Image: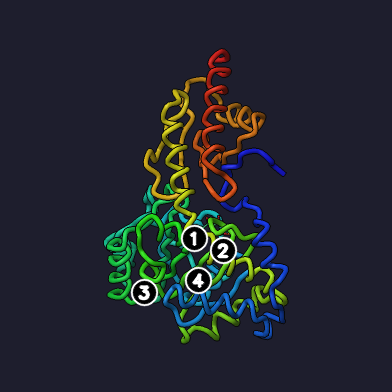
Amino acid sequence: MFSGIDFMSDTVTQPTEAMKRAMCDARLGDEQKREDPTTLALEERVAALLGKERALFFPSATMANEVAILTHCERGAELVAAENSHIFFAEAGAPSVWAGAQARTIETESGIFSGDAIRSKMRFPRGPGFPVCQLVVVENTTNMGGGRAWELHELQDVWETCRSLGLKSHLDGSRLFNAGVATGRSPAELAYGFDSVTLCLSKGLGCAAGAVLAFSNAVEPIVRRWKQCMGGSLRQSGMLAAAGLYALDHHIERLKDDHANAQVLADGLKRLESIEVENAYPSTNMVFFRTRREGLFPTQWAEACLRKGVRFSQVGENRFRAVTHLGINEEDVQKSIHILKEIENALRGLT
Ligand SMILES: Cc1ncc(COP(=O)(O)O)c(C=O)c1O
């Protein structure tokens, strides 16, 4: 286990002592039989927060996304999503594996796209030989798109387009609270026009595991069936749900600190010669950057960082992502910038 300053992802957080106490004190029952009171309480709370009729607890955001896709798509259907969206590039081809749906992707660096971009992906002519588009998936915030939060008018454009084309829409809101904090919009406002919404507990909210999928009464039997089918029904999941309830009470407000720390990091990285920052003004908790000195091998740089106790995720040949979270404070960020400066000086001699 890496024990340094870990910018790898906001999934690396450890539960706080208070969160662990909440987990230990949770009232438990059999979730699969709908008898776990803590899980039921979390589901009710999330449904209300997102302005949806129902919500169900899931072991992971990936499973929640895939059950949503199974719910909205028939075999052979097409779905539209950003090319750099998690459901397309990091869920092991799952939409095609489970739902038998193929993705028609939109090329967008930021992960944000317009209603016109969706329209441009519709198939004409129509007929038995052509796949039928049934679903649009939006990611908010956009992970590989720079952690960008969608503006409300951008979402409204997507909702209106989906409505006019008769498409369902799913929100991968794994980091929806980051988007809410960044835009000043409530989760319900950002979720309003979507048919289903995934909320992840184990990213910015700092839980060890879990996600919640919210949706309408009309699809509840289908969602439940696919959850069972995927092995997502649990037993005493209240221990995980209790962490989720704790996080909703204590870990949303503080996301602004993560965003501020991402800005401090971006500002520090900008001062380094060896690094080019992609998003100089991070929208939320992610900073993307490239190593740029000629002759500087990105892996050599990353290894030097690891040896000095700082970790990033390498997301391209010389592209890196830094994610701030509750395990990182401003002092850690300043210390990391200092370490990177030392590495820059040390590697200067090698090039
Ligand atoms: C935008 C987004 N959606 C979904 C997921 C899947 O989450 P999990 O790996 O917890 O299933 C991730 C994970 O990083 C993500 O970044």
Q: Nearer the viewer, mark 3 or mark 1?
A: 1
Q: Nearer the viewer, mark 2 or mark 4?
A: 2
> Any mark on residue 252, and which?
1
Element at badge 2?
Answer: helix
Element at badge 1?
Answer: loop
Element at badge 4?
Answer: helix
Instruction: Find residue 291 and report its horizontal and vertical position in percent.
Output: 49, 29
Residue tagged by mark 4?
Answer: 69
Determine whether label 2 and label 1 are within 8 Å by CB: yes
Residue tagged by mark 3?
Answer: 167
Mark 1 surroundings: few (<14), some (14-19) or many (≥20) residues within 10 A: some
* Distance between the alpha carbons at the discs numbered 2 and 1: 7 Å
How many numbered discs?
4
Task: Give the residue type that dot 3 points to.
Answer: Leu
* Distance between the alpha carbons at the discs numbered 2 and 3: 33 Å
Q: Is residue 131 visible?
A: no
Residue tagged by mark 2?
Answer: 247
